Image (cartoon, rainbow, N blue to C red):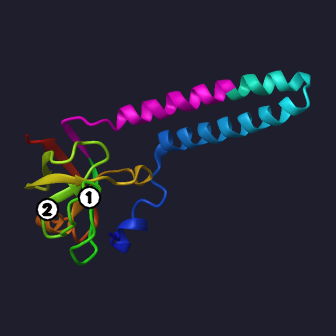
Amino acid sequence: MKLEPQILYQQHAFGLGLRGILVAAAIVVALLAIAAAAAELRRPSAAGGWLAGAALVAAIVAAALVMNAAAAHGCAPRFAGLASYYSNGESGPRTASGARFDDRLATAAHRCLPFGTRLRVSRAGRSVVVTINDRGPAAWTGRVLDLARGPAIALGLAGPGVARVEAEVVD
């Protein structure tokens, strides 16, 4: 499946947010500190102990930030955020659930809701019920839901490509 080009870069090229930047920075610092500590183990010095301690602290901070970020994007039964749509212009490829993708069907991708979960997605007075059958959107996009083209058109999302929606689990 390919994403519509306007969705990829138009509105969210740098939409990581402060939390995403902090998580990425903590992970990079942790990896660099661990690499430096490993190099110091080959030639022990007073700095080796300091680097090992710094690596441990950086790894703990990175883990805490990642868990906090994961908890913030948990699988709540009601959520709101940016949604986009994806379409390859034809049916055929398999989704993460194993079902064949058909961009006309009322389906969507979500990071953690179980496959088969039905969601009522609303935007600007319109609503549509979709079934989760794929994984996504990518965490770095800042989006909470990827809709197939059919429900995106029903919600008036096909023009802008990305828009704020509200969603709740139906059953």
Prevalent SS, magenta region: helix
Task: Give the percent coordinates (x, y) of residue 71.
Answer: 37, 31
30 drawn magenta: no
List the single residue furthest toward the bottom.
Answer: 89
Quarter of the view holding residue 90: bottom left
For the residue pair 86 and 6, the one nearer the viewer reads as 86
Q: Secondary structure at mark 1?
A: strand
Judge from the rendering whether residue 12 lies leftward or rightward of residue 58; answer left or right.
left
For the residue pair 33 and 21, the one nearer the viewer reads as 33
Give the quadrant of the C terminus.
top left
What stretch of residues is rendered in magenta? 56-80
Q: Is residue 67 above or below residue 127?
A: above
Residue at x 58% of width, y 27% of height: 61
Give how far apart the Cα atoms at labels 1 and 2 are: 10 Å
Callout 1: 10 Å neighbours few (<14), some, many (20+)? many
Name the mark on residue 155. 2
63 drawn magenta: yes
Mark 1, residue position: 163
**Is mark 1 in CB contact (under 8 Å) with mark 2?**
yes
Dot 1 or dot 2: first in sequence order is 2
Task: Give the percent coordinates (x, y) of residue 73.
Answer: 34, 38
Quarter of the view holding residue 85: bottom left
Judge from the rendering whether residue 60 lies leftward or rightward of residue 73; answer left or right.
right
Callout 2: 10 Å neighbours few (<14), some, many (20+)? many
